[in-house]
Amino acid sequence: MAREILTVAQMAAADRAAVERGTPTPVLMERAGEAVAQAIRERYAHRPVVIWCGPGDNGGDGYVAARHLRRRGWQVVVEAAYPPSTDACRWAASRWKGEVRPLSTELSAGTLYIDALFGAGLSRPLEGDVARLARLAAEQPLSLVAVDTPSGLHGDTGRPLGDVAFRADLTVTFHRRKRAHVLVEGRKACGEIVVADIGLWAAEGADLFENDPDLWGKRFPWPALDAHKHTRGRLKVVSGEMWNTGAARLAARGALRIGAGAVTVLSPPGALAVNAAHLEAIMLAPFGAEADLAVAAEEADAVIIGPAAGVGEATALNLQALAQTGAALVVDADALTSFRHDVESLFACLDRDDVLTPHPGEFERIFPGLLARTPERIAATREAAKRAGAVVLLKGPDTVVAAPDGRAAVSLNGTPWLATAGSGDVLAGFIGGLIAQGMESFEAACAGAWIHAECGARHGPGLTAEDLPGLAPAVLADLYARR
């Protein structure tokens, strides 16, 4: 089952719903604190523990974790930043029979520190002794575990609320990830993230999900027993001129490896010989003017345009011609930039089956100022999809995919090994190849992004874009085995 990513408000609503259904807050707190203690026991050897407890329910989780660790023989001290201010925190504090002292600025590298100060619900910058403690913690190598989120981070953006926030090696959160756990700034501050089940129910109306096979795997387009190449999808890729042909071939190879049955590179006449010298299973066809391109693409299920296609009027006209064919379009790179001065003409060409795949620079050209004006990438990508009337995939370590209807997903398996020229061209090929096989465009974009990242992670250091298509079969085999 696909896992939702919740806002702070949605998580609070899930807590309230559990209480209304008969699970008291202290029971939920007991489960949460025990989950924190268990995650620590599984990852750390016995050592002194200091738990920084805040005044609210996050602090209450800390008091419970202290009790469970002490019961298992750990040496635990609680440092209370403030007196308990909620009934549940007072209940948890009353059950802790160990040492409680004020926050100390004497930090030890041999001690495990647990940040149970504020969590994701904080709405103002850290201040006073807590802010000073966060600055000291940032200046020295400490082992730090955060409860829910590192204190000082905004739960819905992952960004510090002020000029300082804690950074953890391990973060234990509950029920579902929040946005701070999936957006790259928050993920860097959270370290390893453990999501503990404390008995809550799925959130109603959630439309943001973790991008993994639970989201799209049941609808992956595996071939039927009687499949042949034409039933597995016809994909075409528009090539650039003679000196810019490699990107189109990378996209074409990606599409072929992901399962598209018949893949053709559509090539300007001057680039035919170069493309022919490098293609085998991928077919090749010429086109001259945009009208020729439209004819060549008439029978395609999907067309990729943009990888090294050239920036300018010719590429814009080619895309406008392809929009008349009925094929789903994957619009990348140069095809996006060709409309930077006339984005409404681009949007007029698109429909909900089309996919735009910008990196942040291309996103800024087509949606100027949108990333800066919105609180985080998820909101920006959703707004972009709504404006464009198409699926938008915003690349990055926290790749976001959004559909015009508001659905969105965030990738958690991003890898820095993909930061190499041409990897985005292969991604376009993966997405186009899945759409050509009949996969719905939003899910194809999600699946393509996930598979692309898995390929990069499996190769690791030394990855080049040419490696990626050849890595796909092993990832697909694993997906097939678990279908």
Image (cartoon, helix red, strand yellow):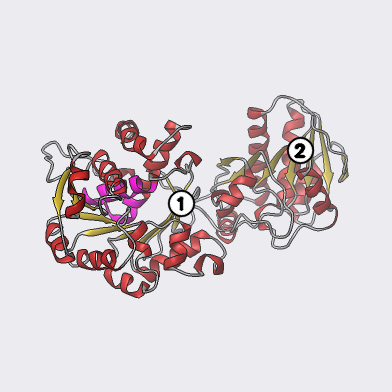
For image coordinates 35% across by 52% down, the residue present is 445
In the rendered image, residue 387, in percent from the top left (x then y), is placed at 39, 71
Pick the front one: 327 or 176:
327
In the rendered image, residue 106, in percent from the top left (x then y), is placed at 88, 39
Q: Does residue 351 belong to the magenta stretch? A: no
Distance from disc 1 to disc 2, alpha carbons, whole Å, reads 32 Å
Q: Which residues are magenta?
A: 424-445
Could you tell whether 192 is left or right of 93 in the image? left
Rendered view: 15 above or below 196: below
Label 2 crowd bin: few (<14), some (14–19), many (20+), radius 10 Å: many
Could you tell whether 131 is left or right of 447 in the image? right
Of the image marks 1 and 2, the number of the one nearer the N terminus: 2
- Give the residue number, with chain letter if any, for mark 2: 113
Disc 1 is placed on an element classified as loop
Q: Amino acid at mark 2?
A: Tyr
Q: Does residue 440 belong to the magenta stretch? A: yes
Q: Nearer the viewer, mark 1 or mark 2?
A: 1
Task: State whether residue 188 appears in this view.
Answer: yes
For image coordinates 75% across by 36% down, the residue present is 141
Cβ atoms at labels 1 and 2 below 8 Å apart: no
In the rendered image, residue 283, in percent from the top left (x then y), is placed at 15, 44
Could you tell whether 7 is left or right of 417 in the image? right
When asked about the image quadrant of residue 9, the answer is bottom right
Q: Main secondary structure of the magenta part?
A: helix
For image coordinates 60% across by 51% down, the residue present is 185
Disc 2 is placed on an element classified as strand
- Give the residue number, with chain letter if any, for mark 1: 399
